[in-house]
Image: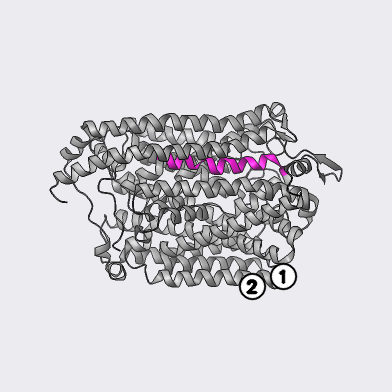
Amino acid sequence: MANAVKNPEVVQAKQYEASQSTWDEIAESKAFKDLMATKRIFIVPAFVFFVVYYFALPVLVGYAPQFMSTKVLGQLNLAYLFALSQFFVAWVIAGLYVRAANDFDRLAKDILNKAEDAKGGK
Amino acid sequence: MSNIPLIMFLIFIAITLGITYWASRRSAGASAYFAASRQIKGWQNGIAVAGDYMSAASFLGIAGIIAFQGYDGFLFSVGWLVAYLTVLLVIAEPLRNAGKYTMADVLAYRLKPRPVRAMASLSTLTVSTFYMIAQMVGAGALVKLLLAGKVTYNEAVIGVGILMIVYVVFGGMLATTWVQIVKAVLLMAGTLLLSILVMAHFHFSFGEFFGAIAHVTYHDAKGQEVVKDFLTPGLRYKPPYGPLDLISLGLALIFGTAGLPHILVRFYTVPDAKTARHSVVWAMVLIGSFYIMTTFLGFGAATIVGPDFIKTHGGTNMSAPLLANALAGSIFFAFISAIAFATILAVVAGLTISATTSFSHDFWTNVIHSGTERKAGEEVLVARISAFVVGAVAIAIAIVLGPTANVAFLVALAFAVAASANLPVIVLSIFWRRFNTVGAVSGLAVGLLASIGLILVSPSLMAIDPPTVTGTARHLIQAKAWFPLENPGILSIPLGFLGAIVGTLISHEPTSQHKFNELLVRSNTGLGAEKAGAH
């Protein structure tokens, strides 16, 4: 490692370059469109859900403080439990995303391999 | 007070200088200096992101707000974690796939590099230096309190400033990363220990703990004894504008975190997008656990120490250290104080390296010298010099402002600029084919100006002080605030997007549309992404 680091030229891998038509070709390919669709199906609903769920907290706490002060479990009120639930909901969404992203990786890998084969390189 | 806090501070300094020495021998070359050769492992980067992000404002500030204003303080905690979903779902992977060292790299793919980089660099420097000044003033005041009688405010500011310069100038991103990792581990350990001690105080009974929170006794401003249920919302955010301010704060956190330059640069230190993704998840586990534990820190301080005592022993920011002192005595106080110190250092180091990376990579190399180094190593040399300059300027400003300066608004400002200027242009350049250079520049400019302008006329800077408040503690403009909210996000974020969209629609730039496919493919597949340095 020491050798490589001493010589910056070795460390900086060459960027993948391609012509405009190659990029257009990949972007228009079915494989790439499938990847984008697969991503969209997970990411858009997940994003909308977390934004709505999160902003429900300041809205409810800010505009319905009496209701949110309702005690539901001993001294614990709705406001605290709803705030606490945000942490677990965020973790669950993150976990689901990591699972879904395995599919993204698989689809992206196919596109990558094809593109690099086409270059005749590796 | 004994010498124990000082000794613990010195131990931490010695460890971090050791790390810097080790890192300095591995920081030759731009990729090594700016991105730790992209060889940081996912879990390591996750811990470092947590260490980069959780500032003294979270550790001491939130504990203090909860100790004085109860539940409303806990609302901060929620937003600081949930914000990472935006980072995870939208930003981290495309950024790692398409960029090299800064967020401007992603913009420069399809837009005209020079104007876009110049503007993005200005925005980055604004966010980082404002945030840094807030941290430095806080650090000086805090270290002075923690090492009562041993160092002055100025000495503390200079000390913190010199350390952060040393880490960044000599150790680059690698040293910064490991300082952040050490700090995050210490912070988590200290917080966990403190939480366990709080529960032990209540005989490990949640019923008893929350029972005490429901009856916090203190004296109000008029000297009347009051008993309040600290779990009730509304102790801080009161009508008429409180609820709106709360929503505005939420917007700034949710959209701002994903636009904070010092967080974004961390994703360039890992080998690929998948590792970047895993590091966000690691960070979320740590950050979430930490913020849940602010329940014990804040409410523990409210119930065990009490607002009255805290007010007369250093004020809100001392809540967590005073709690440690009450539960386990002066050695634990020293330990928690040293953690607070470590917390500040790790964050300012992260801010320094993001500011210098942007200056040297975006501004110096790409704007002034059209993308080529005139001689090998110039970019890193410029970064080292600018780290020194940024540090020196931050020290000077913090000293001029002094320990009582009203600087809390600077943190809100940093998040507002990140959310209103940076995030809109990153998102639009990744997702909107029609987006172009004029749109990016006007989006950044409008977001930046709207955030600064609105904060300038907000209650943070515009208010009428009683004559007893003097110097830099006074509000800048002595008049009734024009804009009623402390957080401008609710208005400045839509304005930032609007600026970007209108700018795009009134101009025409065919190349940015043609090149959209390239960015789309690169950012979504990782084709041609920067590789890690050789092993």
Image vertical order of residue B500 relative to residue B148, above or below: above
Q: Residue furthest right?
A: B224
Check contact, mark 2 vs mark 1: CB within 8 A.
no
Look at the image and give the residue range highlighted in magenta: B69-90
Q: Determine whether, in the image, residue B463 is placed left or right of residue B517.
A: right
Question: Label 2: few (<14), some or many (≥20) within 10 Å?
Answer: some
Judging by the rendered image, the residue that carries numbered circle 1 is B149
- The mark nearer the N terminus, 2 or 1, is 2
The residue lying at 61 percent from left, 33 percent from top is A58
Image vertical order of residue B190 relative to residue B152, above or below: above
Asked if residue B296 is among those painted magenta in the image, a careful observer would answer no
Q: Secondary structure at mark 2?
A: helix
Residue A37 is at least partly visible in this image = yes
The location of residue A59, given as percent across then percent down, is 61, 29
Q: Mark 2 — on which chain does it sit?
A: B
Which amino acid lies under the numbered mark 1 shown in the image of this protein? Gly
Residue B425 is at least partly visible in this image = no
The residue lying at 34 percent from left, 35 percent from top is B431
Dominant secondary-structure state across the stretch colored magenta: helix
Judging by the rendered image, the residue that carries numbered circle 2 is B7
The location of residue B294, given as percent across then percent down, is 64, 48
Q: Quadrant of residue B324?
A: bottom right
Co-location on one chain, circles 2 and 1: yes
Q: Mark 1 — on which chain does it sit?
A: B
Q: Determine whether, in the image, residue A102 is placed left or right of residue A73.
A: left
Which amino acid lies under the numbered mark 2 shown in the image of this protein? Ile
The location of residue B270, given as percent across then percent down, is 37, 54
Q: Quadrant of residue A30?
A: top left
